[in-house]
């Protein structure tokens, strides 16, 4: 086992899958020499892209086969290169799209929602859609309203899209490898602050993880704390702090937010009888609302001895640029602790 960061785990998964299958390619802004907006693809251009460098006159460029042009850096037109990826997936390739920021999916919604998600259904299963879209998102970097959003609930509302949001290196690598091998369109959410999260990953093991399962990240008996992505990291720290007060928190990491692992939620809530759902996306109509609905619609509801509590991002304003306001906009370790203390009174 080696301890690595989430960004290294994602890089390794991309590299290993490109070595495994020559039909895997990556398309996105600045993913070559620059290594992508957050450095995840750094070093892959030298290994997989034999396109002549920018100093070679255009008239002298050879016409390389697609297998030798596997890191494609398009203009800043998300709608255009997402459409290219959708078409390539229908043709049998396995494209991985990288947006610089997850917010920019708004420039490509038709291709994601009306094409990628629906083609297999509209064509009666005659085509596959092995497409992965990587969404670096979340706030905490001072990137303000248009570069910090958590819009995953939008995609969870679209039939045909699978949405995953890992919180640690082991899950990130196994899920991305599974996503690339899947014949369905996958929205792969990566938190910008989560890139530096460290964890152990098996050395030299070619493993994948299911794209529909949650896991208990910490056992507990007093309350269930449900989350995903980087907020899971905060939840684990909150649980650690509350342990000193005699509060035993169970942390359930959803990991896959569409489809959601209903049984894992039900089992944990039945065990503890109390639940807090925390996430960074806007609370109103967010993933937490769906989780609350699952609990209310199931036998777990009759095991509750407190109301279901949701704790998400602010409903009424965009993400601020100001550091202090941004910090207060979303759940933090201390505010998660406060919510749990209030719920247990």
Image: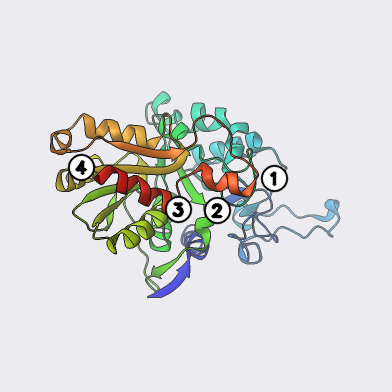
* Residue 263 badge: 4
- For the residues bearing labels 4 and 3, Cβ distance under 8 angstroms: no
Say which element carries label 1: loop
Q: Residue at x 15, y 48 (%)?
A: 271
Q: Residue furthest front?
A: 345
Find residue 196 and report its horizontal and vertical position in percent: 52, 63
* Residue 230 badge: 3
* Residue 151 badge: none
- Check disc 2: other Cα within 10 Å, few if <14, some if 14-19, many if 20+: some
- For the residues bearing labels 4 and 2, Cβ distance under 8 angstroms: no
Seen from the viewer's position, the closer of residues 287 and 54 is: 287
Find residue 51 and report its horizontal and vertical position in percent: 71, 57
The residue under label 2 is 192
C-alpha distance separating marks 2 and 3: 9 Å
Residue 26 in view in this figure: yes
Number of the front mark, 1 or 3: 3
Which quadrant of the figure has residue 221?
Answer: bottom left
């Amino acid at each position: 086992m080696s301890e690595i960061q989430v960004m290294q785990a994602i890089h390794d998964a991309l590299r290993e899958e490109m070595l495994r299958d020559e039909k895997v390619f990556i398309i996105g802004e600045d993913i070559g020499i620059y290594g992508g907006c957050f450095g995840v693809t750094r070093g892959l251009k030298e290994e997989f892209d034999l396109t002549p460098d920018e100093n070679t006159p255009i008239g002298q460029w050879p016409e390389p086969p697609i297998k030798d042009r596997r890191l494609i850096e398009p203009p800043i037109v998300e709608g255009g290169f997402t459409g290219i990826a959708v078409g390539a997936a229908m043709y049998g390739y396995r494209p991985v799209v990288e947006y610089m920021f997850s917010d920019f999916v708004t420039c490509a919604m038709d291709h994601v929602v009306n094409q990628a998600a629906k083609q297999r259904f509209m064509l009666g299963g005659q085509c596959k859609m092995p497409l992965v879209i990587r969404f670096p998102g979340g706030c905490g970097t001072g990137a303000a309203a248009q570069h910090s959003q958590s819009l995953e609930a939008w995609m969870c509302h679209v039939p045909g899209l699978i949405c995953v949001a890992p919180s640690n290196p082991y899950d990130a690598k196994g899920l991305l490898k599974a996503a690339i091998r899947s014949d369905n369109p996958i929205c792969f959410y990566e938190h910008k602050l989560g890139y530096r999260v460290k964890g152990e990953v098996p050395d030299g093991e070619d493993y994948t993880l299911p794209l529909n399962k949650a896991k208990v990240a910490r056992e507990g008996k007093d309350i269930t704390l449900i989350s995903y992505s980087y907020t899971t990291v905060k939840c684990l720290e909150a649980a650690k702090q509350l342990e000193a007060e005699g509060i035993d928190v169970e942390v359930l990491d959803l990991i896959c937010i569409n489809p959601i692992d209903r049984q894992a939620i039900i089992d944990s809530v039945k065990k503890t009888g109390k639940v807090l759902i925390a996430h960074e996306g806007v609370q109103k109509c967010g993933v937490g609302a769906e989780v609350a609905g699952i609990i209310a619609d199931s036998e777990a509801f009759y095991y509750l001895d407190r109301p279901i509590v949701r704790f998400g991002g602010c409903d009424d304003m965009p993400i601020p640029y100001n550091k202090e306001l941004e910090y207060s906009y979303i759940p933090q370790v201390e505010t998660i602790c406060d919510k749990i203390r209030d719920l247990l009174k």
